[in-house]
Image (cartoon, helix red, strand yellow):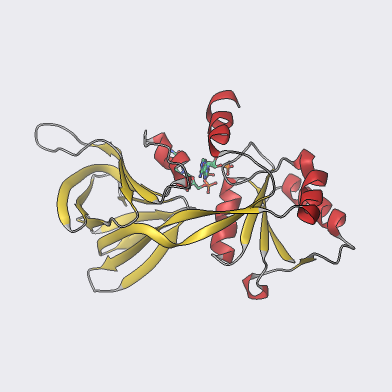
Amino acid sequence: MKMATVLRNDDYSREMDRLLRQKISGNDKFRFVEGKEEEPELVISIGGDGTLLEAVHEYGFGPQYVGIHTGHLGFYADWHPDELDEFVEALNQVQPLVVEYPCVECCITTVSGEHHAKWALNELVIRNASLSTLVTCVFINGEEFETFRGDGLIVSSPSGSTAYNKAVDGAIVHPSIEAIQLSEIASINNQAYRTINSSLVLPQHHVVELIVMNPEIMIGLDREQAVWKGVRSIVCHVGRQKVKFARYKKLPFWRRVRKSFITG
Ligand code: NAP
């Protein structure tokens, strides 16, 4: 099996990578490769959830992913560094369960008519490029829904629902549910302006269109963020492709939620 690693840029993660390679060396079932062109079948992320996001954007939808968390327990990483021996044993012995997580897919259209296809495993975020209010008309399945005024909007995937989306009181969605969630960041709600002021969870076949009124906005896609000028609209829906995770041990989603947010 061809494997690659993606590391958080710290000494602890580099040391885990060194140990992992040492424990696997001499086992001709596995070969470490580097780079997408080498088509690894398994990508091991060593770091945090942010590292896993980086890995997924580097290697795309082809390989399966597994994570070793060198910080706190994450949503995408199953293995603790103390379990390195068990992990190597599992690689050797266990047929993993492959679970697939939906992404957010979107098309950004500019006023000059360019289309940019993008995707995110956690979320798409839009904010005004300056501190003034973002103004966006929200259409759902082609019908006008509301005009949003506020700091920003988040369109998250189920697995991204525990990230930025949760910080703005969005719902946590189990990753087996094929949906996207539209959440507000600090909407203005007064006698002049009104939004739904709740997160909306939309099923697989629904489409959210954001018509952007600001000349310049900030767009975030997972870890990547950039200022975009002249964006006319952003159309979002559940992605056609999913990210595949290799589960070599059981760690149910709700247990992860509890450990991450309640018990530690
Ligand atoms: P970061 O600002 O360095 O870290 C953001 C935190 O979000 C980290 O603790 C990260 O976990 C955690 N995280 C990432 N994906 C998660 C998920 N699916 N569920 C629960 N927690 C998650 O940024 P980063 O490491 O590059 O990660 C990018 C993500 O940061 C974005 O996708 C966005 O969701 C999140 N973010 C959150 C807020 C907020 O909560 N107010 C604001 C901006 C961005 P690890 O420590 O394990 O990497």
* Position of residue 136 measured from the top left corner of the image (x, y, whole percent): 21, 51
Q: Is residue 161 left or right of residue 33?
A: left
On the rendered structure, is 164 left or right of 31? left
Q: Quadrant of the C terminus?
A: top right
Which residue is drawn at the image coordinates 24% and 57% (left, top)? 209
Q: Quadrant of residue 206?
A: bottom left
Locate residue 47, reporting x and y percent: 66, 47
As drawn, 34 above or below 70: below
Q: Nearer the viewer, residue 183 or 128?
A: 183
Is 30 drawn above or below residue 7 in the view shown?
below
Q: Quadrant of residue 104?
A: bottom left
| Percent position of residue 10, x then y | 70, 48
Residue 8 appearing in the image:
no
From the viewer's side, name the closer residue of 172 and 108: 172
Quarter containing the N terminus: bottom right
Q: Is residue 76 visible?
A: yes
Residue at image position (81%, 50%) is: 89
Say which residue appears at 33% left-offset and 65% top-offset. Answer: 107
Q: How many marks?
A: 0
In this view, 74 is above or below 180: above
Q: 257 or 167, which is in the foreground? A: 257
Q: Residue furthest top?
A: 263
Q: Would you say 142 lies left or right of 202 here?
A: left
Q: Among all residues in the image, which is located at the extreme left?
A: 192
Q: Position of residue 246 (x, y in %)?
A: 64, 54
- Nearest the viewer among 44 and 194 is 44
Horizontal relation, residue 28 to residue 194: left or right: right
